Image (spheres, rainbow, N blue to C red):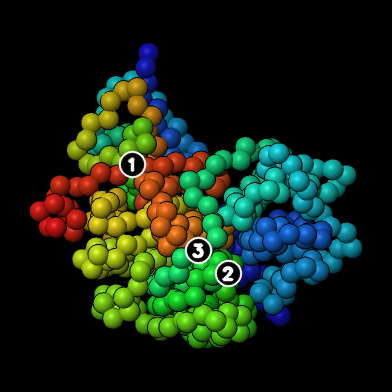
Amino acid sequence: MDIERGFLFKWYERQLLVEGVTKPLLLRLAGETFGGLSSEIEERIAELLIRSGLSGITGDFPRQKILPFYSPLIYRQKATIEFIDGDEISIEEDEGKKIVAFPHTLPLIYAPVIAANVFFQLMSDASSAAPVKELPVSLDRLIRKGRVMVIGAGGLGCPLIKTLLDSGVDDVCIVEPGEVKLNNLHRQILYDYGDIGLSKASVIERKISQYYSGVSAKVYRKQFDPELIRSERPDIVVSCVDNYDARYLINDSCYRNGVPFVDSGVEGFSGYAMFRDRESPCYRCFMGDNRKDTAAPKGILPFASYFGGLLEAAIVISYLNKRPYEGEVFSFDLKRNRFEEISVERREDCPICSKAKR
Amino acid sequence: MTLLEVVYGDRKWDFDRDLTYGELLEETRLGRVSVLVMVNGRLVRQGELIPAKSRVLIINAANGG
C-alpha cells in the first residue's frame, strides 16, 4: 500500500496526539513487537496499543487486517514487549526487552488503564510504576436480562456493544448514522480496514449475526430521534455520542420518558462516565446547558474511549442486575493515573430536572 | 500559609486567597477552554466562591465519543 509519507506523519500526529512525528519515532514504535499473548486481558492491551501506533508484528493479532498501511515492515524475530505478572503496573527494560508487569488477577476493565500506562511510558522513554487504583464499578456477570438502547457506535459504542454482548445481553437496539472512515480505525474496535466506506450500522448487523446468533438486535442507520425511546421502550439507554447537542437531546428524552441512561464523554486521554435517572441531577446539571460544539473535534486516544465504553458497560450491567451504580460522575485521566468521583448537585433552575419542572 | 491548590492536567497553581469561579478561570487563563471545576470533589458553577485551603481540580468538559 502506497501512502504518502507526509500524510502518514500527519495521520500519526492526529492519532497519537503528539506534534512533530518523525521517521525515527515511527520506526521505534513500529519496532515494538509483542511476545505470545496468553490471556484475554493481554490480547485487549495489545490491541489497544497496536491501534495506538505500536505496529510490530505479532502472531497473535491480525494487525494487517485492521491497519494494513501502518507498518514500515520491520519484521523482528524476537518480541520486544513481554507481559508478566506483577504487583503494580510497570514497564522496565531488560536486555533490550520491555517487561510490562501488572497483576494478572485484574479484571478486563483494567485493560485500557494498563495500555495507557505502557503507551505513555513508551512515548516518554521512561520507566516507572503506577499503583493499581480501585475502580468504582466492575464488569460483573449478567444475571438479569433487559433491553438496552445504544446511541452511537464509535469509540465508546464499539467496546460497549462488544462487552455487553459478551456479557450476555441479548436484546439491543443500536442507533448509528455514520460510515466507517480511515480515522475511525485506531479506536473503533468493531471496524477493520475492509469496512471503510460501509455504514457502521451494516457492519454491526453483520458482526452480530456472525458472532452472536442468539441476540435480538435492531440497528437503525439514522440519527437519534426521541421518538425511538417511546417506540423501542428500552430498559436503559447508553449515550455513546460525540457532541453536546446529542447528549442534551438524549438527556432530555430519557428524563421526560423516565428511562435511565448512562453517558460517557472522552477527550485526549481523559473522560468521565455516569448513570442518570429521575432521582439524580441530569446531564445539564453536570455540564451546564449552554455548551457549544466546535467544528473541529478534538483527538481521542484509543484507550480513553475504550475505557469510557467499558465503564458504561459495567454501569449498564450493574443496573440490569438491580445493583445500580450509586456513585456520582466518575472522572478519569489515563495519562496521569488520576481517578475521581465528582459530586453533582441538582440546579434549581435546570430546565429539565428542577423540582419546578417535575 | 494555607493555599488554594489548583490542578489542570500537568499544570499547577497556588493561590493564597479565596477566588470566585470567574477569577479562577481568569487567573489560570482557562476562560476560553471548555472545562469543569471541582472543589474538594464537588462540581462548582459560575458565581460560586472557592475558599482558600481548597483542592481544586479542573478537567475538560469532554464531549467526544
Of A286 and A144, nearer the camera is A144
State which quarter of the image contains the N terminus of chain A. bottom right
What subunit carries mark 3? A
Q: Is residue A18 left or right of residue A80?
A: left
Which residue type does callout 2 highlight?
Answer: Asp
Q: CA distance from mark 2 to mark 1?
A: 32 Å
Camera-side mark, 2 or 1:
2
Mark 2 or mark 1: which comes first in sequence?
A: 2
The crowd level at tag 3 (other Cα within 10 Å; few <14, some 14-19, many 20+) is some
The span from disc 3 to disc 2 (Cα, nearest Å) is: 13 Å
The disc placed on residue A343 is: 1
- Label 1 element class: loop
At x 22%, y 41%, the residue is B46
State which quadrant residue A182 falls in. Answer: bottom right
**Mark 2 = which residue?**
A166
Residue at left 22%, top 35%? B48
User: In the rendering, at what x and y percent does residue B54 appear?
Assistant: 35, 26
**Position in image of residue A155 (x %, y %):** 50, 66
**Residue sitting at x 25%, y 44%:** A345
Question: In which chain is the residue bearing label 1?
Answer: A
Amino acid type at mark 3: Ile
The quarter of the picture where the C terminus of chain A appears is bottom left
Instruction: Report which residue position mark 3 lands on.
Output: A143
Circles 3, 2 touching at the beta carbon (< 8 Å): no
